Amino acid sequence: MIPLLAAAASLLVFCAPGYPGAQGDAQPLVDEFAAAATRAAGLPAGSITAVYDADENSDLARLAKADAVLAFVPWPFYVQHGAQLHLKPLVQADVAPVGTTQRWTLVAKAGHAAPPAGLAGLTVISTAGYAPAFVRSVVSAGAPLPADTTITASGQVLSGLRRAASGEPVALLLDQEQAAALSGLPFAPQLQPLATSKPVPVALIAVVGNRLPAAKAKTVREALLRLAGTPDGAATLGRLRLKGFVAPDLPAGAP
């Protein structure tokens, strides 16, 4: 058994900006996950704790503190803040029903001009709007956006799609589940995809800086990789819409 920062519990921060659910609702689930990961790693009870936070600024504040050793982050968060926080991917999440990777799709009014020039005067709305570096990488393939294009974070995806279909100057950047549901909307014929990303990870668990020594990180990594293989672990993962974890496989050019 390898003690994991025996002097204090190691905090795993579930960073979920743009996702529904208050901390109070999700906290019992992430507590259960932390306990299951601790058992799988053969560590003393309480060695790993967890907190769920759906606010970007609060996430950054938590991760700035020394007790934040691990971070569960969506890919847009990693693109936006990974370098700043010195995040080192440990495992890649297998998320139900999408899988380990997904494509993001930019949608606008049918007949709209292609990006980046076609985004002039538009507001790009997305649950990932808090991560403009990620949004730009998808909607303009890294090319500069027109000066009057704005990016905004919003979970009001359905109302945004209605606005786009009616001709308002907005476009929506959708994750894979949102894009898959598009065809079922009555106003879908009034919309069209303008750009689609290459497959990117859905989410990662990363080590924050050098806060977890390599040998201890390996212990946690191996525990997470085998967590889905136990009834206890599989049940816990399922309640978080996770199927398990795999070794990280990041796109070329990733931070």
Image (tube, rainbow, N blue to C red):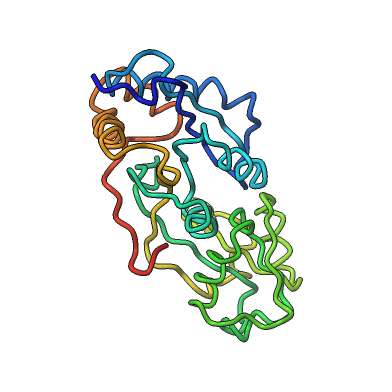
69 shown above or below 179: above
Q: How many marks?
A: 0
185 shown above or below 6: below
Query: Residue 151 or 209: which is nearer the viewer?
Result: 209
Q: Position of residue 132 (x, y in %)?
A: 60, 64
Q: Position of residue 210 (x, y in %)?
A: 40, 44
The residue under the point 37% across, 37% down is 212
Relative side of 22 to 139, left or right: right
Query: Residue 206 or 139: which is nearer the viewer?
Result: 206
The residue under the point 74% across, 79% down is 148
The residue under the point 50% across, 77% down is 142
Query: Residue 150 or 110: which is nearer the viewer?
Result: 150
14 shown above or below 120: above
Relative side of 149 to 63, left or right: right
Q: Quadrant of the C terminus?
A: bottom left
Q: Quadrant of residue 211?
A: top left
Q: Residue furthest top?
A: 45
Q: Quadrant of residue 10?
A: top left
Relative side of 72 to 190, left or right: left
Relative side of 194 to 147, left or right: left
Q: Quadrant of the N terminus?
A: top left
Q: Position of residue 160 (x, y in %)?
A: 70, 59
Q: Position of residue 38 (x, y in %)?
A: 35, 21
